Image: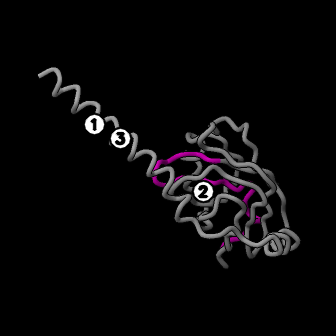
Amino acid sequence: MNRVALLLLSHAAVALVGFAAGIYVLPILTAPSSPEASALRSTAERAAYKGEFRRNLKDSDPLHWGEGAVSIGREAISLQGRIAPGPDYKLYLSPQFVETEADFMRLKPQMVRVGDVKTFDNFIVPVPANVDPGKFTTVIVWCESFSQFITAAQYK
């Protein structure tokens, strides 16, 4: 009986590790191509605001981080940099700087969701016509599926 329990436990552990690896790897395998450098430059040139994603935020860690220059404009928000790969990333605008999950959840009713982040090496996310980035101060990448803070940049 002891051998059967050990066998079941080992198989369950392998299945769990495989599932976790799949959650991490699947977004990388299915991600579309990153935007062209010329499109990033064009978006950055038209941006009204600039910010920077940094790895050293309070709730950032080796699996949840971002780094690079963020450009915020009326038509699009772009990143020239990288974010840690993961599933179901959303881009939000916040009226206050946020660097923890608790702060994000507290301020979420005051935020606006801009759109989906589907690439991890540079991105361009269109800003909906009814959203004015000038009414906010911070851009945030958030993992909706796991309620996980990824990164943020204050631009005003």
Residue at the spot 27% in from the left edge and 36% down from the top edge: 11
Work out which residue is located at the far left of the displayed protein and give it: 1
Residue density around tag 2, few if under 14, some if 14–19, many if 20 or more, within 10 Å: few
Instruction: Tell me residue 29's x, y (percent).
Output: 53, 61
Identify the residue position indicated by label 3 in the image: 16
The span picked out in magenta is 131-150
Identify the residue position indicated by label 2 in the image: 110
Residue density around tag 3, few if under 14, some if 14–19, many if 20 or more, within 10 Å: few
Split into 4 quadrants, where in the image is the N terminus? top left
Q: Indicate how the structure is coloured in the image.
A: one colour
Split into 4 quadrants, where in the image is the C terminus? bottom right
In the picture provided, is 70 more to the left or to the right than 59?
A: right
Question: Which of pointers 3 and 2 lies earlier in the amino acid sequence?
Answer: 3
Residue type of the residue flagged with mark 2: Gln
Instruction: Tell me residue 34's x, y (percent).
Output: 69, 67
Which type of secondary structure does the marked residue at label 2 adopt?
A: helix
Residue type of the residue flagged with mark 1: His
Residue density around tag 1, few if under 14, some if 14–19, many if 20 or more, within 10 Å: few
- Say whether residue 85 is magenta: no
Residue at the spot 52% in from the left edge and 65% down from the top edge: 30
In the picture provided, is 28 more to the left or to the right than 17?
A: right
Label 3 to label 1, Cα distance in Å? 9 Å
Which type of secondary structure does the marked residue at label 1 adopt?
A: helix
